[in-house]
Image (cartoon, rainbow, N blue to C red):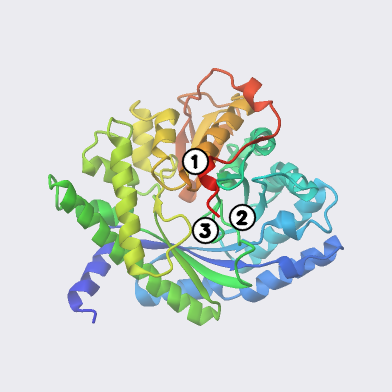
């Protein structure tokens, strides 16, 4: 039974501690939309999205009002478009036409983002994969709500270094194509290793081929709640600290479970997973960095940061899996620089560098996320960052990613404004020494020995 104290506690989480349901994401398979004719494929995609997701925004808003828990974003993820367009796309411009169709459907439905303009190339690229990848700069320049992702490696297959090298070039070109808007196209493009099939968070969301025709995935976020609770036990021992985080994560996940089940029932689409990720926003009091400071750091980046983040991530997952039988996606702590005011403050204070962020990604969700770098950073250096993160994911059997923005015309110390949930970011320094000779080798980095478990 739920008693009045639990109702009041949840109400306080929402009103004072910035608890929210970050996203309800409908994953939709587009495999049955594929046709040898490009126009027919586009028409099929538009028709299916507008049919299955027609009530998504209304249902999300209704649930938010009725339950008193804000549902911030309503989103769609689709089958990797490299697969859907393989039969009808003969040049990058053909894939851009599909990109415009997805964006048009997103605007019609009123959703925030549609993800899945994607290719999975962890072992090699098909012609369609390469065409889609080469279309990304144009697609990001001519759309508003489309997100792109490319999976370049996995624990089972290793890392496709040809794809890594190409993605370094694509990131640079995407930045150039959107330079009049702070190179914002790169904020909607992420390169992953071990990408999950059921991630509801952008920009890496796509609807995996192992999923059903449509599914509801919900992402819950509550860094403000965790921070507020930890303030009440300041100075406590590690056992108390861990138990407090775990119990708080349990309560947050239960809210997400309730919203997910209700959305599933009202939309008539099966429930998939809850993703409990401590995803910050630029709002004051909604910061993972604040949690790390409450644990005992002057700033993220100080000695002990990786240990504190490992503790936080583990307890969040332990609490989440006790609250729902279907926890999936990424689930853990995000550390995007531009979306977390505490991380921005740490960079400005000189406490946090890209190298320290890379170390932190060994123990948290995702990777180098929403980091602005100088616009003149070489494509090979960007590819080197991608390769490093992919290696961390491959060896540690976890999802890692890179979403860096080489902001045209900006240098270290400048600030770039992205707006909304994407926030603003200080431009961070990239190691100036070259890795070009390594990146220009061809082929794959093989899978680690522990991948052979089948």
| Residue 14 shows in the view | no
Q: Nearer the viewer, residue 25 or 159?
A: 159
Q: Which quarter of the rendered picture does the C terminus lie within?
A: bottom right
Quickly name the residue at label 3.
Answer: 199
Residue found 23% across the figure and 82% down from its top: 1
Tell me the SS state at disc 3: loop
Q: Is there a contact, CB below 8 Å, between mark 1 and mark 3? A: no
Q: Quadrant of residue 185?
A: top right
The answer to whether any part of residue 371 appears in the image is yes
Residue 347 point in image, percent of width and height? 38, 31
* Residue 345 position within the rendered picture, expressed as x and y whole percent measured from the top left: 34, 34
Query: What whole-number distance in Å separates the C-alpha atoms at marks 3 and 2?
Result: 17 Å
Task: Describe the element under mark 1 as helix, strand or loop.
Answer: helix
On the image, numbered disc 1 is attached to which residue? 395
Relative height, residue 142 to residue 443 (above, below)? below
- The residues tagged by marks 1 and 3 sit, at their Cα atoms, a distance apart of 21 Å
Numbered label attached to residue 145? 2
**Residue in front for this viewpoint, 366 or 403:** 366
Residue at 67% across, 33% down: 165
From the top left corner, tell me how far across and down residue 144 is, in percent: 63, 52
CA separation, marks 1 and 2?
33 Å
The crowding category of the residue bearing disc 1, from other C-alpha atoms within 10 Å (few below 14, some 14 to 19, many at least 20), is: some
Which badge, 1 or 3, is on the more N-terminal residue? 3
């Amino acid at each position: 039974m739920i008693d009045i104290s639990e109702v009041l506690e949840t109400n306080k989480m929402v009103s004072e501690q910035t608890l929210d349901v970050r996203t309800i994401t409908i994953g939709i398979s587009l495999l049955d939309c594929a046709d040898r004719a490009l126009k027919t494929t586009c028409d099929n995609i538009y028709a299916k999205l507008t049919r299955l997701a027609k009530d998504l925004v209304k249902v999300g808003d209704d649930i938010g009002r009725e339950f008193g828990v804000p549902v911030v974003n309503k989103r769609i993820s689709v089958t990797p478009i490299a697969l859907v367009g393989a039969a009808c796309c003969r040049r990058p411009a053909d894939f851009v036409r599909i990109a415009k169709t997805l964006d048009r459907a997103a605007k019609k439905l009123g959703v925030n983002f549609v993800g899945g303009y994607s290719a999975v190339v962890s072992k090699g690229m098909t012609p369609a994969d390469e065409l889609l990848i080469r279309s990304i700069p144009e697609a990001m320049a001519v759309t508003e709500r489309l997100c792109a992702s490319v999976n370049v490696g996995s624990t089972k297959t290793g890392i496709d270094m040809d794809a890594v090298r190409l993605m370094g070039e694509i990131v640079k070109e995407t930045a150039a194509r959107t330079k009049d808007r702070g190179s914002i196209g790169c904020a909607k493009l992420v390169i992953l290793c071990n990408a999950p099939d059921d991630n509801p968070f952008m920009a890496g969301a796509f609807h995996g081929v192992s999923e059903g025709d449509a599914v509801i995935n919900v992402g819950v976020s509550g860094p403000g709640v965790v921070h507020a609770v930890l303030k009440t036990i300041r100075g406590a021992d590690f056992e108390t600290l861990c138990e407090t985080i775990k119990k708080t994560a349990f309560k947050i996940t239960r809210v997400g479970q309730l919203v997910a089940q209700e959305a599933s029932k009202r939309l008539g689409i099966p429930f998939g997973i809850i993703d409990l990720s401590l995803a910050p926003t630029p709002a004051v009091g909604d910061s993972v960095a604040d949690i790390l400071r409450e644990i005992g750091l002057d700033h993220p980046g100080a000695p002990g940061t990786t240990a504190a983040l490992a503790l936080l991530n583990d307890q969040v997952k332990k609490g989440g899996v006790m609250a729902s039988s279907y926890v999936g996606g990424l689930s853990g702590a995000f550390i995007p620089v531009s979306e977390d005011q505490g991380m921005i403050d740490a960079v400005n204070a000189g406490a946090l560098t890209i190298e320290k962020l890379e170390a932190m990604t060994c123990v948290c969700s995702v990777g180098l996320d929403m980091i602005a770098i100088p616009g003149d950073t070489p494509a090979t250096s960007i590819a080197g960052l991608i390769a490093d993160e992919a290696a961390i994911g491959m060896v540690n059997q976890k999802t890692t990613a890179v979403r860096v923005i080489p902001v045209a015309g900006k240098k270290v110390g400048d600030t770039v404004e992205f707006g909304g949930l994407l926030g603003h970011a200080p431009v961070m320094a990239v190691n100036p020494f070259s890795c070009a000779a390594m990146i220009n080798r061809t082929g794959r980095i093989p899978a680690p020995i522990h991948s052979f478990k089948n």
